[in-house]
């Protein structure tokens, strides 16, 4: 939701479009996984499409790199630490939920204090 609201919708979309190729590269380099001939052809077509999009877009903004590099590193870390299972997923979501709830409460308190300050400044 953040990207479209802040004008980075296309950049994030391009990052998600590039991400499968970066996943293949990380799988090959980090885990020595092999591609079948059909997968190699599919990757070639995907690479051609990515190069075409990069030429058309003429610039690569930072959200592209966050998505196409950040997520593969995140998935690599899960595989490397053997935390790619449902119990770890649920535990992570519980932690994220509590963290976001705290951020929301802090943000709401800051907004209330700012509104109060602006109210007093107008008096």
Image: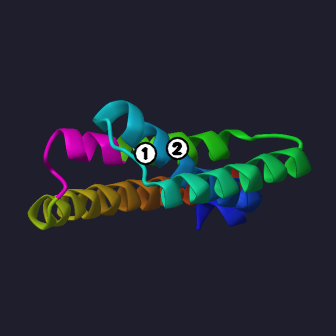
Which numbered dot is residue 22? 2
Choose between 90 and 15: the one closer to the eye.
Answer: 15
Image coords of residue 13 (percent x, y): 67, 61
Q: How many marks?
A: 2
For this orientation, the residue located farthest to the left is 87
Assign a secondary structure to mark 1.
Answer: helix
Quadrant of the rendering where the N terminus is positioned: bottom right
Would you place residue 18 above or below residue 42 in this image? Answer: above
Image coords of residue 11 (percent x, y): 72, 53
Quadrant of the rendering where the C terminus is positioned: bottom right
Please name the residue shown 19% across and 62% down the image.
89
What residue sits right under mark 1 in the picture? 72
Would you place residue 77 above or below residue 42 in this image? Answer: above
Q: Along the horizontal axis of the image, is 97 left or right of 49?
A: left
For this orientation, the residue located farthest to the top is 29
Query: Is the residue marked by circle 1 packed among few (<14), some (14-19), or many (20+) residues within 10 Å?
Result: many
Q: CA distance from mark 1 to mark 2?
A: 7 Å
Choose between 105 and 27: the one closer to the eye.
Answer: 27
Q: How is the image coloured?
A: rainbow
Please name the residue shown 33% across and 43% down the image.
33
Please name the residue shown 45% across and 56% down the image.
107
Magenta segment, prevailing SS (helix, strand or loop): helix
When asked about the image quadrant of residue 103, the answer is bottom left
Residue range corresponding to the magenta coloring: 75-84
Q: Along the horizontal axis of the image, is 44 left or right of 97?
A: right
Which numbered dot is residue 90? none
Which one is closest to the eye, mark 1 or mark 2? Answer: 2
Image coords of residue 121 (percent x, y): 68, 50
The first of marks 1 and 2 along the sequence is 2
Assign a secondary structure to mark 2.
Answer: helix
Choose between 51 and 104: the one closer to the eye.
Answer: 51
């Amino acid at each position: 939701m953040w990207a479209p609201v802040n004008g980075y919708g296309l950049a994030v979309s391009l990052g998600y479009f590039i991400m499968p190729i970066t996943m293949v590269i990380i799988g090959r380099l980090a885990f020595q996984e092999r591609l079948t001939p059909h997968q190699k052809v599919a990757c070639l077509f995907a690479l051609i499409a990515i190069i075409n999009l990069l030429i058309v877009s003429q610039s690569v903004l930072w959200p592209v790199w966050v998505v196409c590099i950040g997520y593969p590193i995140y998935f690599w870390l899960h595989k490397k630490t053997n935390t790619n299972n449902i119990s770890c997923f649920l535990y992570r979501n519980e932690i994220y939920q509590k963290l976001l709830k705290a951020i929301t409460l802090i943000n709401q308190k800051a907004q209330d204090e700012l509104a109060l300050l602006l109210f007093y400044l107008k008096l």
